[in-house]
Image (cartoon, rainbow, N blue to C red):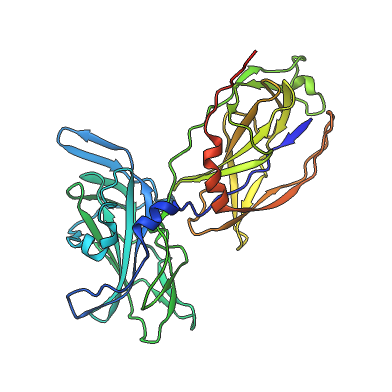
Amino acid sequence: MKRFLMMSLLTVATLASQAQAIGIWTSSHQPDNSSVKEYAKSVGNFFPRPEVKTDKKKTTAVWHGTNMDWVKDYCEAKNVAIEKDYLKLFPEMVGVFENQAYVPLSWRLTEENNEAVLHCFFPMPADEVSNLFLASEETCLVDQETGVQYRIRRTEPDTYNKHFTVKAKKGDVLDLKIFFAPLPETTKDIRIYGVSCWNMMGLPVKIGNQFYGTAQYYDSIPQFHKPRLLREHLNDNLPYDRQNWNTWKVMTDAHLIKPLKNNTMAIWRTPEATYLAVGYEQNWTREYFVFEHDIKLIDETGHQYKLRETQGIPQDELFFMEGMAGDYIAYVMVFDPLPLDLTKIIYIEPAGEPFNAWGANWSGSVTTLDIKQLQENQKLFEYFPRKIVE
């Protein structure tokens, strides 16, 4: 009996209960400086705190959410402003800001001295943080009614189109600024582009009154039990041949889970990758599976998120998983990272080349997946050791 991994995708990994504790985004706060006009602000997204290393009295960390590897210029940021009133700007963060598991990347859009200023706040997880990235030629504001684009003028500190290292006191909140031309009084809705670390790649923003939303969180990398190779071939010591199942690999020690419906999926999103798990009922002691490289995720705009890896199991080869009839097992596929604002994702498994096996079925599939449900399914994939009563 054949099974195919129909993996689904993730996107908005919001922890609802924590988001409710944090509250809504609002632009009701007006700063004391009357020359500053506030357009909107947000507590932003929460990222897993990077590994912090201690060398004598100094702590260092490498930021993991850049995803701008093609930019080779690097610098050390100088004269970075420190936001002393962060908790006054975001009073809903009192008691949440100190959470050591996450780094909140909040932001605030203002008008100051006849310019629009995007303040990107970065709480220092260490005394020195490297691999940060702020803005480039892609950075702009776009009026959703008129279509007018407000392109970036400059950044403070000057880190334009560069990765950078910054030094400050651990716990300080940096105020990294991006400058644009001022927005007209009639502006109602914009989108912010080109600020990838703060997940602003087309982020919708409502100007004035209240800008609602919930904080969005990246997940930590899920820890799954990885299968191991039991035999290189089932019986025939020959090169792999999909038409000869005796040449297929035999794997064992799959990640065991509690009983669930076949093809149930869960998703974990990190800044670097998307992890999609799928669960199966094992009907036979030895059952075969396959994961092809052209399985992909596609969002509503048509952007594709490619399959990078199938953890612990072969890719583009049929293989056997040996266990016990009655087991429930899970596999994990790793895709390109998904934007946090996605609510749906399309999972596509193209049709494949036929092969000789019991009940072989090589038809393709297109499945639309709900990200929120995939996130809620994470708890279904906790490791559950096999329990036998005789």
Front one among 59 and 42: 42
Front one among 208 and 314: 208
Residue 162 in view, yes or no: no
- Which residue is found at the position 32% from the left and 63% from the top? 107
Query: Left of 367 or right of it: where is 217?
Result: left
Front one among 140 and 23: 23
Seen in the picture, residue 276 relative to 173 is either above or below; the reply is above
Disc tally is: 0
Residue 123 in view, yes or no: yes
- Which residue is found at the position 25% from the left and 62% from the top? 91
Image spot of residue 267 (x, y percent): 54, 45
Residue sitting farthest toward the front: 390
Query: Left of 336 or right of it: where is 114?
Result: left
Front one among 139 and 318: 318
- Which residue is found at the position 22% from the left and 60% from the top? 87
Seen in the picture, residue 170 relative to 324 is either above or below; the reply is below
Seen in the picture, residue 181 relative to 98 is either above or below; the reply is below
Q: In which quarter of the image is residue 330?
A: top right
Image spot of residue 68 (x, y percent): 42, 52
Query: Left of 181 or right of it: where is 225?
Result: right
Image quarter hosting the N terminus: top right
- Which residue is found at the position 44% from the left and 45% from the top? 219
Query: Left of 256 or right of it: where is 30?
Result: left
Image spot of residue 350 (x, y percent): 74, 47
Residue sitting farthest toward the top: 390
Image quarter hosting the C terminus: top right
